[in-house]
Amino acid sequence: MVEASQSGERSVDDTVLDAARDCVLAYGVRRTTMTDVARRAGVSRMTVYRRWPDAQSLIGDLMSREWHQVLMAAADAETVGSARSRLVSRVVAVARQLREHPLLCKIRDVDPEVLLPYLLDRRGNGQDEMLRFLAAALAAGHEDHSIRPGAPEVMARAVFLTTQSFVLSVRTVADDVPVEEFDRELALLVDGYLRPD
């Protein structure tokens, strides 16, 4: 994960990733080039290529950074209640923020094929981070007995798969239903799945 320097200054990596985000928002993934990113970041192409071998790896790191920021914002949001209630609130918050995230919306609308490998073949770094977050939250729920027994890693994957569909597929069924209604339904689904007998 790319981080700012300890002095508080923005790193070159962050500057390049910001430029990549701006390019994708302006042109889409397929039309974003390393030259465009370097120009927008105000650095040489070699500076970009030293850090990322190609646009695909750059966009992968950009998505990981953006999803990390969403996850961290949700993780800091809810600090009271049982581990289960905190987890449900965070899952719904992450789903809502990702569904509305400008970068994800642009990729989904213009370059949906970019998402297909992460839906059908393999996980990305952002997905792995979300699974670790869920497993840790589930373990906390086992400790306070607010979540039913079960393997946290397996349960995390079930919650992840459910939430992913609410992020990426909700438009296919939301033609006459306000999207906010699906947030309430997601909360009910996840809470019911995790609730002890």
Image (cartoon, grey):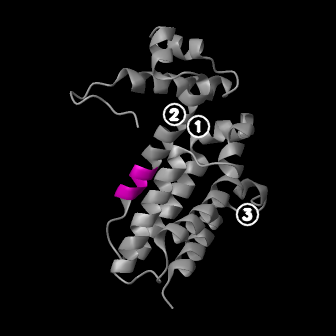
Q: Are marks 1 and 3 in contact (CB under 8 Å)?
A: no
Q: CA distance from mark 2 to mark 1?
A: 9 Å
Task: Estimate the x, y position of residue 129 in percent, counting from the top left.
Answer: 46, 51
* Residue 75 among magenta residues: yes
Q: Main secondary structure of the magenta part?
A: helix
Residue under label 2? 62
Q: CA distance from mark 3 to mark 2?
A: 32 Å
Of the two numbered discs 3 and 2 in the rendering, the one whose residue sits closer to the viewer: 2
Position above or below: 169 against 110: below
Q: Residues within 10 Å of mark 3 (few under 14, many from 20)?
A: few
Of the two numbered discs 2 and 1 in the rendering, the one whose residue sits closer to the viewer: 2
First-in-chain label (1 vs 3) = 1
Task: Estimate the x, y position of residue 6 in percent, counting from the top left.
Answer: 22, 30
Position above or below: 192 against 16: below
Residue under label 1? 103
First-in-chain label (2 vs 1) = 2
Q: Are marks 2 and 1 in contact (CB under 8 Å)?
A: yes
Task: Estimate the x, y position of residue 123 in percent, counting from the top left.
Answer: 59, 49
Q: Residues within 10 Å of mark 1 (few under 14, many from 20)?
A: many
Q: Amino acid at mark 1?
A: Leu
Q: Residue 183's quadrant in the figure?
A: bottom right
Residue under label 3? 177
Judged from the image, the secondary structure of the residue bearing numbered disc 2 is helix
Q: Are marks 3 and 2 in contact (CB under 8 Å)?
A: no
Q: Amino acid at mark 2?
A: Leu
> Which stretch did the figure color magenta?
71-76
In-image side of 54 versus 90 (left or right)? right
* Residue 57 among magenta residues: no
Considering the image in quadrants, where does the N terminus appear? top left
First-in-chain label (3 vs 2) = 2
Position above or below: 26 against 97: above
